[in-house]
Image (tube, helix red, strand yellow):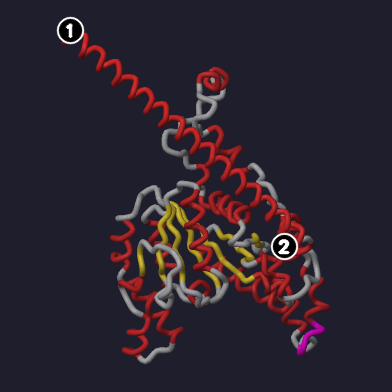
Amino acid sequence: MPFGEIVIGSPGSGKSTYAYGKYQLCTALSRPISIVNLDPANSALPYPCAIDISHLISLESVMDTYGLGPNGALIYCMEYLEANFDWLEERLAQLDPAAWVVFDIAGQVELSTNHDSLKRIVQRLQKLDYRLAAVHLCDAHYVTDASKYVSVLLLSLRTMLQLELPHINVLSKVDLITQYGDLSFNLDFYTEVQDLSYLEAQLASQPGGTKFASLNRAICDLVEDFGLVGFETLAVEDKASMLRLLRVVDNATGYVFAPPPGAREATPAAPLAREAQRRSTTGPNTDALFSSAFSALPGGDVRDVQERWVDAREEWDEWEREQWAKEGEAVARQKTEEELRERKRQNKESAQGGQDKGVKGTRIRERKA
């Protein structure tokens, strides 16, 4: 039962950077991971790629052969992949069965909102028993502009309805949000998609806002009527932020509930007390999966995210630098102590070896005598 995620989003939203960050994080956690590049326009991959669509079809060759532009060529490449799905299936079968699979999709939004090839590819992956979630990255700077934020809401809703997957919308690059302007509301207003009527005054104040007031109101009402859209936050270079999103995606796919290798099965309620005494307190067990899945992570509240990246960023940066310095000193001390222990061990072995040679020489002389 392989697990994975479909990484989608507009161009420049940070999909490949996120995929590389996910690779680094999972590698540090000793968690198998494979990345599948399904973006034929992405020739400079920052991550080790297990499967690359460019080995099947080239965007440049499609543009030259059929006289298509970049957008049309991307759609053709996705249709070609759908028609040759067996190529992808054969290569997926060669991956580590325990590996988490990240599918890096091209940034053309039509692929995930209107065109059906990606949807059908996802459905065929599900028939192969893949447990997938869609991770939709949206640049966080859109929340600094009311009209852009409304457009992102509509795009996210359309994508959710199109792909029909467990869906996580993510405001990426939240660590850069202050570079684009001030927030009119607290960050949780945007992540939780609260009462959108508060945006009407801002929308009306923009050029042409009064002309499109009815349209803006209708779009906001549509988003609120569905009640599906919400956002997580992501600063890909921040370990805590990546860990929080990792937990969210694991919950969405059900990966967090899959027992790790060697886990014991849960037992009926009656003998639980005896079984708890018998079990190792450190060994993995399925009884603990639900509690760990829903436990809170430090800094998981969006208000903490706002404090970290908006309200008190400089103070947090200074605190982190101090912690990194202390960590570096601790690592240096540990390394020095290990070197001293190793040197003592070698000296002890050398002394023991010399003593053994002396005893052996004495015994030889005694035999000769």
Q: Position of residue 132 (x, y in %)?
A: 47, 56
Mark 1 lies on a secondary structure that is: loop
| Residue neighbourhood size for the residue with mark 2, other residues' Cα within 10 Å, grouped as few (<14), some (14–19), many (≥20) | some
x and y percentages locating residue 114 in the rendered image: 51, 76
Which amino acid type is shown beneath numbered disc 1? Ala
- The CA span between labels 1 and 2 is 84 Å
| Residue shown at the point (58%, 50%) measured from the top left | 247
Seen in the image, is 59 located left or right of residue 305? left
Q: x, y (%) of residue 188? A: 75, 61
Q: Is residue 209 left or right of residue 93?
A: right
**Residue 359 in which image quadrant:** top left
In front here: 168 or 237?
Answer: 237
Q: 91 or 174, which is in the foreground?
A: 174
Q: Is residue 29 above or below residue 10?
A: above
Give the vertical position of 237 relative to 1 (above or below).
Answer: below
Please tell me which residue is depicted at 30% across the width and 73% down the height of the picture: 56
Q: Is residue 15 magenta?
A: no
What are the residue bounds of the magenta stretch? 204-208
Q: Which residue is mark 2?
A: 309
Q: Quadrant of the C terminus?
A: top left
User: Residue at the front extreme?
Assistant: 369
Query: Can you tell which mark lies on residue 168?
Result: none
Q: Earlier in the sequence, mark 1 or mark 2?
A: 2
Residue indicated by mark 1: 369
State the predominant SS element of the stretch in magenta: loop
Percent position of residue 336, x then y: 53, 40
| Mark count | 2
Crowding at mark 1 (Cα within 10 Å: few <14, some 14-19, many 20+): few
- Tags 1 and 2 in contact by the CB under 8 Å rule? no
Q: Residue at x 62, y 71 (%)?
A: 139
Amino acid carrying mark 2 in the image: Trp
User: 205 or 124: which is nearer to us?
Assistant: 205
